[in-house]
Image (cartoon, grey):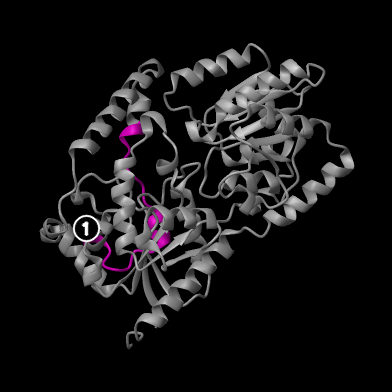
């Protein structure tokens, strides 16, 4: 009889372009066809807030009421969700969307501040708490992909279910993220997970070191599982017609090489450093013309928006919102270089995607980047825009033979980071932990 294992994430169905949600979905989807000795159950349906405020939103309540311990991933994927965001976007004129979004973000922030979660004793008395107790008695193990999940508020030591968590990065402990910075909330959530989890998966040795340094209660119960990336997206050669169509639609000049950045444009991604580097390179080497493409949301950040406009006056620059995977793949395959000088990461999937696309990678020499990219990236100090510019110039001037050799080696390196490998290692660890902690339930 396989071990009955449940997986928590706040929104498996959401095709969010980046982040933990996509990682969780990719891992669980990769588990489905594998023979790993686990009966996998998704314990989550879409809820409105990825950081729960009240226990009444616990996904287990709805899950147990409708699908008593038998919700499959296929069932989950077929469902449709009610979205206020889609309704508002379809009704309001575009000019009103930014102020509405700003008001909503401030409201959520206020609700987080004043809406302290109830105590564990109070949680257990709610209907959701009772359902959670039932589930934790029935399951052999569960995996929660985010420390913010309310399941960590339960006294898990009182249940036979093996509690397993994931830790991706300690960015709130290392950097001030401006208006999105909430270290108190992060501290409370990760402290609970570090204390109550029986085992915690970390996506890099860098993340594991941060977890054990900032939260010593996690010492002795961690393991590293490197994440994967969508390798199949890069197995086909670039289609020139699709490439030209994408460049034309986005307004990217076809007569100039371009550098590409992909991701949410937030402080830690160091887009400001990229802009400084491009301006410096433009001034010091006007004989090497190039352009810059930024693909990703820019939430708020009026100063950065102004900096982008200022840079666009000095050189060709295109800033887009999130783009479909196919278009990102095409842009990566045609870029002169992928620039990702992040101030801190937990892993850095975009670097692997660029390598698989056959693009030179310029990235930071801090955190997990050297661990993940090995000798196949061009490293720089993310706090020194001159170093970023120097590596960008190296992309433009690299001899064809050296470039081809580097790209071939980088592709081979990135091919080892797959979701199947990641999911398989996690499943093997779960089975080993279960085998070591209790006797298997009889048929």
* Left or right of residue 303: residue 332: right
- The answer to whether residue 36 of the structure is visible from this angle is yes
Q: Determine if the magenta segment contains residue 153.
A: no
Q: Nearer the viewer, residue 324 or 281?
A: 281
Residue lying at 73% horizontally and 40% vertically, measured from the top left:
360
Instruction: Looking at this view, name the residue that lies furthest to the top.
Output: 313
Residue lying at 59% horizontally and 27% vertically, measured from the top left:
273
Please state the extent of the stretch shown in magenta in the rendering: 65-86
User: Compared to 386, does 59 lie above or below?
Assistant: below
Please name the residue that numbered disc 1 is placed on. 61
User: Compared to 204, does 108 lie above or below?
Assistant: above
Q: Give coordinates of residue 225: x percent, y percent.
A: 53, 62
Q: Give coordinates of residue 442: x percent, y percent.
A: 32, 88
Q: Nearer the viewer, residue 205 or 140?
A: 205
Q: Give coordinates of residue 374: x percent, y percent.
A: 68, 53
Residue lying at 34% horizontally and 21% vertically, measured from the top left:
92
* Left or right of residue 217: residue 390: right
Q: Determine if the magenta segment contains residue 68.
A: yes
Identify the image quadrant of residue 398.
top right
């Amino acid at each position: 009889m396989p071990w009955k294992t449940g997986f928590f994430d706040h929104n498996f169905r959401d095709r969010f372009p980046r982040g933990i949600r996509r990682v969780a979905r990719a891992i669980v989807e990769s588990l489905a066809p594998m023979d790993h000795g686990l009966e996998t159950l998704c314990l989550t349906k879409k809820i409105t807030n990825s950081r729960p405020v009240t226990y009444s939103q616990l996904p287990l309540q709805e899950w147990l009421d409708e699908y008593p311990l038998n919700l499959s991933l296929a069932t989950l994927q077929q469902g449709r969700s009610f979205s206020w965001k889609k309704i508002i976007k379809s009704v309001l004129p575009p000019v009103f969307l930014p102020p509405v979004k700003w008001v909503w973000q401030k409201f959520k922030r206020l609700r987080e501040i004043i809406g302290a979660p109830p105590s564990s004793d109070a949680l257990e008395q709610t209907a959701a708490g009772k359902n959670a107790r039932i589930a934790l008695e029935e399951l052999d193990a569960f995996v929660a992909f985010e420390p913010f999940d309310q399941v960590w508020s339960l006294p898990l030591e009182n249940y036979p279910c093996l509690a397993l968590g994931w830790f991706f990065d300690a960015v709130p402990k290392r950097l001030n993220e401006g208006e999105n910075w909430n270290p108190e909330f992060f501290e409370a959530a990760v402290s609970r997970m570090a204390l109550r989890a029986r085992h915690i998966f970390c996506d890099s040795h860098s993340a594991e070191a941060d977890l054990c340094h900032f939260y010593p209660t996690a010492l002795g119960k961690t393991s590293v599982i490197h994440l994967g990336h969508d390798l199949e997206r890069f197995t086909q050669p670039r289609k020139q017609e699709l490439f030209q169509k994408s460049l034309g639609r986005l307004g990217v000049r076809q007569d100039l090489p371009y550098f590409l950045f992909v991701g949410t444009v937030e402080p830690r991604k160091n887009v400001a450093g990229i802009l400084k580097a491009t301006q410096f390179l433009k001034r010091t080497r006007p004989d090497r013309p190039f352009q810059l493409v930024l693909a990703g949301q820019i939430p708020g950040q009026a100063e950065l928006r102004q900096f982008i406009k200022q840079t666009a006056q000095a050189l060709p620059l295109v800033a887009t919102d999130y783009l479909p995977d196919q278009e990102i793949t095409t842009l990566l395959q045609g870029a002169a270089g992928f620039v990702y000088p992040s101030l801190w990461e937990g892993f850095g999937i975009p670097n692997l995607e660029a390598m698989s696309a056959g693009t030179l990678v310029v990235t930071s020499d801090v955190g997990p980047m050297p661990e993940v990219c090995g000798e196949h990236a061009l490293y720089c100090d993310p706090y020194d825009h001159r170093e970023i510019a120097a590596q960008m110039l190296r992309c433009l001037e690299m001899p064809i033979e050296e470039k081809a050799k580097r790209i071939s080696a980088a592709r081979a390196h990135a091919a080892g980071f797959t979701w199947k490998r990641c999911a398989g290692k996690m499943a093997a660890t779960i089975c080993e932990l279960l085998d070591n902690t209790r006797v298997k339930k009889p048929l």
